[in-house]
Amino acid sequence: MKIIDADAHVEECEETWNFLDEEFFQRRPVPVTIPNNTPYRSNNAFWLIDGQTYPKLAGRGLHTFATPPISDYAKSKPYTVGAQTLTDVKTRLADMDRMRIDCQVVFPTLFLVTLADDVRLESALCRSYNSWMAENCGRSNGRIKYAAVVPIRDVAESVREARRAKQLGAVALITLGVAWDRELGNKDFFPFYEEAERLGLPVCIHFGWGAPGLTDLFQNITNSSFSAAMLPVLMGFYSVLSAGVLDAFPKLRLAFLEAGSEWLPYALHQLQRTWRAGRVPVKRNPSDYLESGNIYISVEADEDINHLLRYIGEDQLVIASDYPHGDPSHEEDMVGELEKRSDLAARLREKILGENPKRLYGL
């Protein structure tokens, strides 16, 4: 059985911007460091982008991650910096071998937060990232794939970049649960979903700080991570289903990643109550969309997966390592942890680890 990690990550580095358009070179993200004897301690490196620092670890609007990987925290991880950044693919593959992972689908880190207010700069950053990832993944002998980033506020540019990324070898498109100041079910985004369906690329709604107005509510990083980054995945699920996205694009594959799975029964129940009251203009009972097989959910190894099967088919569950991140979603031994689950049928474990992500990403 070929084991597929449905959601790993890369820590962007200076080389990520090697493909940046000349027009934006002077505005490229610049890594900066500060002493480690400040309240930031080992998280002592930031990207400077148009006068703002990323990550933001103080004040309002907090978000956290370990890129740029020149911080003391990044260097302290049990993975080399080259493996984290995919600049040393050989070492990354060795880590995957140790974790018994045959293939990883890699998602960004820096793009888990809204970046430049200037959408033209954001578009340029997306293009450079996608080109850089295509180059690095090309060195992995097919074992490392990537999800492309798009500047979702500019739908026409997102469509163009999705086409280019498909040609470069991307196997998915990533968006966050809220697109800046718009819901994912906003009809402005329908041309993007239409193109994703045509290209056969799944749209992956991923954990991340996608709505600046929501993120700015929080001054505690734990609360920000849950309320501003994780809950929007649920918001995205409710929004796309209630807006009829799958009525309009019945072959579109959707995945909901890095938010666990036990939220699904609650969100579905609330959606069904609203549908029965006639306030959701979709053609079918919301549960029918789950039964269609187009929606995938990432489970965590310690969740009540058997209960989840009452609401979604066993062919639609995947699992992820979150490598090389160090947050609570990280599953150092995702294969071993799932193997320990004697309450799960062996055939189900095989599907979660291999067949389902293969189908999701068209591998």
Image (cartoon, helix red, strand yellow):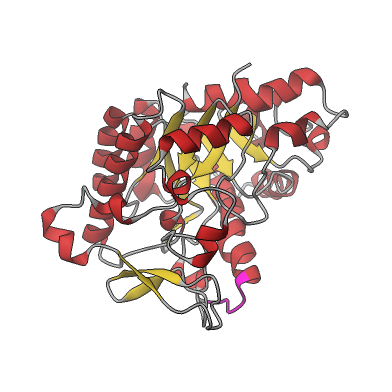
Q: Is residue 328 magenta?
A: no
| Residue at the image position 48 percent from the left and 37 percent from the top | 91
Nearer to the camera, 323 or 204: 323
Q: Is residue 16 left or right of residue 140?
A: left
Quadrant of image for the N terminus: top right
Hey, which residue is sitting farthest left in the picture?
Answer: 23
Nearer to the camera, 17 or 41: 41
Residue 292 position in % (x across, y down): 60, 25
Whether residue 283 is visible to the viewer of this picture, yes or no, is no
| Residue at the image position 47 percent from the left and 21 percent from the top | 363
Q: Is residue 138 left or right of residue 207?
A: left
> Within the image, what quadrant is residue 114 found in?
bottom left
Residue 219 vertical placement versus 325 (above, below): below
Residue 277 position in % (x across, y down): 68, 48
Nearer to the camera, 190 or 180: 180
Q: Main secondary structure of the magenta part?
A: loop
| Residue at the image position 12 percent from the left and 55 percent from the top | 22
Nearer to the camera, 41 or 226: 41
Residue 54 position in % (x across, y down): 41, 68
Q: Which residues are magenta?
A: 217-221
Whether residue 234 is visible to the viewer of this picture, yes or no, is yes
